[in-house]
Amino acid sequence: TLRKTYFSTLTPGTPLNLERASEIGGRNSGHFVQGHIDGTATIIDKWEDEDSLFFKVRMDDVDLMRYIVPKGFVAIDGTSLTVCETNAKDGWFTFMLVEYTQKKIVIPGKD
C-alpha cells in the first residue's frame, strides 16, 4: 500500500479515509470494491455545480484508463465513487460528490 499510494508522505494527524469492509449478505448501499491499489492520479480541475462538487483527475499511469469506464466505480482515498466522464486518450476521468458525501470524506479539501 505504501508503494502504490501517497500514504508514505503523510504526517501523524493527517486526515484520510478508510472504508470498512462490508459483510456479504448484509445491506449494501454503495459499491463492492476489491482491495487492490492499481495507481494514483493528480487533480487537474475541480468545480461546483449547485450542491455537487466535481473533480477531474489525470491518471499517473495512463494505461490504467482501460479499466475506468463511465458509470463504473473507483476507490479514491478510501472512498468508492462513481465515474462520470472518461477520456482514455488524454488519461483523465471525472467524478462527482453529492453534498452529503462532501461532509463525510477528505477529498473536498484537496486541490
Image (cartoon, rainbow, N blue to C red):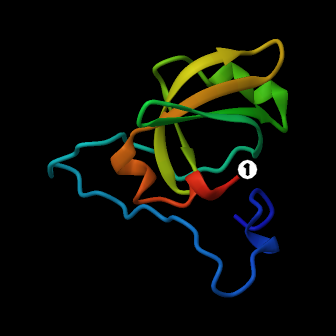
Query: Horizontal and vertical percent for residue 35?
Result: 53, 53
Going 84% across and 35% down the picture, which residue do you hit?
61
Going 81% across and 63% down the picture, which residue do you hit?
3
Quarter of the view holding residue 109: bottom right
Residues 36 and 48: in front is 48
Disc 1 secondary structure class: loop
Q: Quadrant of the N terminus?
A: bottom right
Query: Horizontal and vertical percent for residue 76?
Result: 58, 48
Query: Horizontal and vertical percent for residue 37?
Result: 65, 50
Query: Horizontal and vertical percent for residue 95?
Result: 55, 31
Q: Amino acid at mark 1?
A: Asp
Q: From the viewer's perspective, tell me whether residue 33 is left or right of residue 22.
A: right
Residues 106 and 40: in front is 106
Mark 1, other Cα within 10 Å: few <14 / some 14–19 / many ≥20: few
Q: Tell me the residue that label 1 is attached to.
A: 111
Disc count in the image? 1
